[in-house]
Image (cartoon, coloured by chain):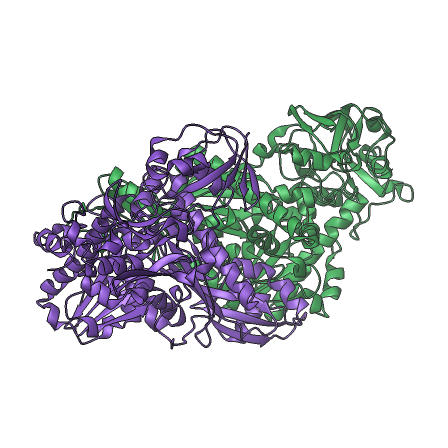
Chain colours: A green, B purple
């Protein structure tokens, strides 16, 4: 079999001939960025062949790569099949440089109400006149004869007791002893809260006795190799049980890596972690649990379940205490998942009395409205534009992403995350760029670039060489090739603007429908919450300028950070919160926008940048 | 690696050099009879080497095999290591010829009270205006929103519903849906009741709607390869976790073979079997559940648990519906197991008002006494003599076993199971033989053979050539070589008589201690129940003659068949019975005979054949 060597990661692997480089990298444990699951449409899986195979470029490569790039060996990984030995340069991913606050939420004080109770005991030794069995000896001492015990723990019990002078600690949850441990371990009760994003998976390790966060970690969702959006993943999973298993394995492996990282940071023993909570959109929930998501994709978008699922860690292969429990919070509908439940919990929306909307923009966009104590939610087909997908030079909010764009003193200035040369543009940068170009008069309210040939007077001199004709209409050069990290111009294209209009129009229209359903108008809102890492970074002024948020809402709008993840932590720390979560599927009214005859009108209206 | 071919089974297998033939046969999936777990002391693992290895006989072989036998290639499998290619003749085991009534119990009418409820539903199809998730759609229809569902079932639910026009059947137990099945399967609710004997494993398939027994099957307990008695198996298991796993795997595999047989007999689908109950002695229970039995062997004989254990079938690898439940009934003490619980249930001893004793003679001997509503039990070190172990030509009650011996008209006559030439002697034959030889005056009340040299007048002429001096004292030829199936004389030896005296003395003494503890005397007993297959076949007159049963108890004594197995079936069929079983560990007073200063006296006294 041909050997493929990946530099600079220095991994070499035998690859079945005919496998494309995207899959080959996956087999080598490397992640190559890309949004289209190898369909050749996003153009992001760029790698450089330094040795071997110089076959003719494919149509997709010709579309996405310049002739200079092709000349120097750049290809699209999804377009190249391995037929002989090769050496490939894969740009190193900068996961570690995710903006730190991606991990942070706004909720600081968690309530500690651990589900696991620990009792340390010292038992009397058996004797010929006291032949009580080991288990009954323990339960009698605990005065809880009704408790059940894990077979795994019972199996070890005889030796454990005798090796530890009959001094052990029982970890009890509900009516089950899930762990019996040597000596006194009553001070060790830990849990992990996950936020399983379509793009990024985050985990926090909590001390459940104090509800304090001891460590956080994040990683890319490795399901990305099967497409950036949930529909690609549902499609893949629906093709076979093996594919479904593959996607489940990927996310479980990523979660296990996070757990490993958290345990390493804190030097805590794996077996002392007894609880896991997770939130994520409905598709992520299905894939995490290994449940067929096929019927989420076509109308009527029916999930297999809504309720919170609770399973043993060992059943999922999640590497905490094998009898530990994993709770995936409930989803509300096919496209309103437990991540939205997390937002509701974090923002106390199920207990608020005022009128408040929450907008969570991740790979999908969900909206929640509480009005007169009534809770409503909907999802919008916002698409993953704000995470960089479908955007020509779009990327996630990592080092080198343009995160802010300013128009001042007749100049357009860009700022990059970590102040390094630009590699692309992330969601906040995209909104800023559109707002800045609107300010500069380079974009018309309809969303079209001004035509520099028809209306040259509208293009200030200093921008004449930056607004140019590209493959999909006009495009504006945000960063020139010589200043970028990619040796290419980084541009905002007409098609990028269209994606942005569709996304922001959908969110705005969704909010309007929720308000209409509640009998309210924009002005009746007491507060607008922006959830998600995106919400933390987007500039309100820009969001208002492009019409993502209602006019005159600036003062009412606050960013609440990773509220979905906060909700997961709150539910991990407290049984009461978990019960609140479980009640939400019954309580939240889900509006299906596609059934609303009034939606299209509002949506089309909302796509314009200025009204 | 050397190849070993086993004839006439026609199995060939590569064997690691140095492995003994007993282990080699085990690896080939063959069972070679034997009681001493390869220690060379029982002499029963006879096989014939027809090709290869003619090394010198070992001391053990010289002891157990005649020079003719050695000459013609007979060896002890435990004594021969594989060093080169060999062809081995292994006598075919006659499992299929176990006496049919081994399987039968005395309880005919079982109460049907199935734990699994089945509900067939036809759900409304989802629509854009009715996006309720599949699971909630089902639970709403059932009007049981509180039910939990197996992840495995949930995973299949979306496809199952759509492939079956939304018509499915839910199998519910407690608050869990354990199975969701296509169409209407409400008439299919089955279960299997096991009796896990040290020597023989038996299973019955029941229709749980009607509590009727549809099929029965039995097999040798393959743990036999690690010794006929529980102590050998505990010793093996205590050496390593792997050994414990090995013993568990053996019994689970045997149980799976029985299930396969039962399903084949009845053409019932595996997934429609939802419940399993099992009884067995405490060691069998531990090994079945994979729980360390180490501390059962040394005083104070402490089990890991007493309670009934309930686990999912999939956890044990038992091949019924994977979410089906397996309940091993509770044990009472280290040597009073759930088999005794089964006897108590089958004989309604927990509900009787008279004074009644039950004697269950299997590989061990357990006694139960109910007196004035008080329930007491003890185990006796009866040893497995009644199942043929420790007896020179002892064997289980299978085809060719001498099952009855008569002394009439000055002759000693033997009868064999299935009327085939004799292969050995089983428990009932052993007791009969002793009684007959007592009648014939060939055995003294003390248990010694009359000395034909010192007292030739005591040996009638017709027996002069049958009472001879053997390796361990005198022995009586029951069947001559020319009439036997083994080409050897089948004898009753002095040492066999000693084993019998120890066994019957222990049982009798145990009974006396129970009576004494209850303040009763022999005459106060209203009934004596003989449980176990052995009880069905032993002749009361012989048992009375040798002093196994109290004098003048003949009319009070009845055989109740395989009562332990009956108890397992009753508990399988009815929740109420299962609850009765669960209460027994608290209710039955366990007497530890080894702590009684009065036991030795009574025991020594009880060993004599006649008083």
Viewer-side residue, A149 vs A598: A149
Residue placed farthest to the right in the image?
A454
User: For this view, does B202 lie left or right of residue A609?
Assistant: left
Residue placed farthest to the front in the image?
B461
Give the image location of residue B453, x and y in percent: 17, 45
Viewer-side residue, A582 vs A558: A582
Kindly indicate the quadrant of the structure image that contains residue B4: top right
Give the image location of residue A352, x and y in percent: 47, 62
Q: Look at the picture and state if B470 lies above or below A50.
A: below
Whether residue B336 is visible here, answered yes or no, is no
Q: Residue at x 38, y 75 (%)?
A: B110
Q: Look at the picture and state if A391 lies above or below A173.
A: above
User: For this view, does A37 lie left or right of residue B448?
Assistant: right
Give the image location of residue A420, x and y in percent: 64, 28
Q: Residue at x 34, y 39 (%)?
A: B64
Viewer-side residue, A486 vs A453: A486
The C terminus of chain B: image quadrant: bottom left
Q: Look at the picture and state if A258 lies above or below B435.
A: above
User: For this view, does A93 lie left or right of residue B31?
Assistant: right
Viewer-side residue, B169 vs B265: B265
Give the image location of residue A124, x and y in percent: 17, 47
Whether residue A365 is visible here, answered yes or no, is yes
User: For this view, does B470 lie left or right of residue A433?
Assistant: left
């Amino acid at each position: 079999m041909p050997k493929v060597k990946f530099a600079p990661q220095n991994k070499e692997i035998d690859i079945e001939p005919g496998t494309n480089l995207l899959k080959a990298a996956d087999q080598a444990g490397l992640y190559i960025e890309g949004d289209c699951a190898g369909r050749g449409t996003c153009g992001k899986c760029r790698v450089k062949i330094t040795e071997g195979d110089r076959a003719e470029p494919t149509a997709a490569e010709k579309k996405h790569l310049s002739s200079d790039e092709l000349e120097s060996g750049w290809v699209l990984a999804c377009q190249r099949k391995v037929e002989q030995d090769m050496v490939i340069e894969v740009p190193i991913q900068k996961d570690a440089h995710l903006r730190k606050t991606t991990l942070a939420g706004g909720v600081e004080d968690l309530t500690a109400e651990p589900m696991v109770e620990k009792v340390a005991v010292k038992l009397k030794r058996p004797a010929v006149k006291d032949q009580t069995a080991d288990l009954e000896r323990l339960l009698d001492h605990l005065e809880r004869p009704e408790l059940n015990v894990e077979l795994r723990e019972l199996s070890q019990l005889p030796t454990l007791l005798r090796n530890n002078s009959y001094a052990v600690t029982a970890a009890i949850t509900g009516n089950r002893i899930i762990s019996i441990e040597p000596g006194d371990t009553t001070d060790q009760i830990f849990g992990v809260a996950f936020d399983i994003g379509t793009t990024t998976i985050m985990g926090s390790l909590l001390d459940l006795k104090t509800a304090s966060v001891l460590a956080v970690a994040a990683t890319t969702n490795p399901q990305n190799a099967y497409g950036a959006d949930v529909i690609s993943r549902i499609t893949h999973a629906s093709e076979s049980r093996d594919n479904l298993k593959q996607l489940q394995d990927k996310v479980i492996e990523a979660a296990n890596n996070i757990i490993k990282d958290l345990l390493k940071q804190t030097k805590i023993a794996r077996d002392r972690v007894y609880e896991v909570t997770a939130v994520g959109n409905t598709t992520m929930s299905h894939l995490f649990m290994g449940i067929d998501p096929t019927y989420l994709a076509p109308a009527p978008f029916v999930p297999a379940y809504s309720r919170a699922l609770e399973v043993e860690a060992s059943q999922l292969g999640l590497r905490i205490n094998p009898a530990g429990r994993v709770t995936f919070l409930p989803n509300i509908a096919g496209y309103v998942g437990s991540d939205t439940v997390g937002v509701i919990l974090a923002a106390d929306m199920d207990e608020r009395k005022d009128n408040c909307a929450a907008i969570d923009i991740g790979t999908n966009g969900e909206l929640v409205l509480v009005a007169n104590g009534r809770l409503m939610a909907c999802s919008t087909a916002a698409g993953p534009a704000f995470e960089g997908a479908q955007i020509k030079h779009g990327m996630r909010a990592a080092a080198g992403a343009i995160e802010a764009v300013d128009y001042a003193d007749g100049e357009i200035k860009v700022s990059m995350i970590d102040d390094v040369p630009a590699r692309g543009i992330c969601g906040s940068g995209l909104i800023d760029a559109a707002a800045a170009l609107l300010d500069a008069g380079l974009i018309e309210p309809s969303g079209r670039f001004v035509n520099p040939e028809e209306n040259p007077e509208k293009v200030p001199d200093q921008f004449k060489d930056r607004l140019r004709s590209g493959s999909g209409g006009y495009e504006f050069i945000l960063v020139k090739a010589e200043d970028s990290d990619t040796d290419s111009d980084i541009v905002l294209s007409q098609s990028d603007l269209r994606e942005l209009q569709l996304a922001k129009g959908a969110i705005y229209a969704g909010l309007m429908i929720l308000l209409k359903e509640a009998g309210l108008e924009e002005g009746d809102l007491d507060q607008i919450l922006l959830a998600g890492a995106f919400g933390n970074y987007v500039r309100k002024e820009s969001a208002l300028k492009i019409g993502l948020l209602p006019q005159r809402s600036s003062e009412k709008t606050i960013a609440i950070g990773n509220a979905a993840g906060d909700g997961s932590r709150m539910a991990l720390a407290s049984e009461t919160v978990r019960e609140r979560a479980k009640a939400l599927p019954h309580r939240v009214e889900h509006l299906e926008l596609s059934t609303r005859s009034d939606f299209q009108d509002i949506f089309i209206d909302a796509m314009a940048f200025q009204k």
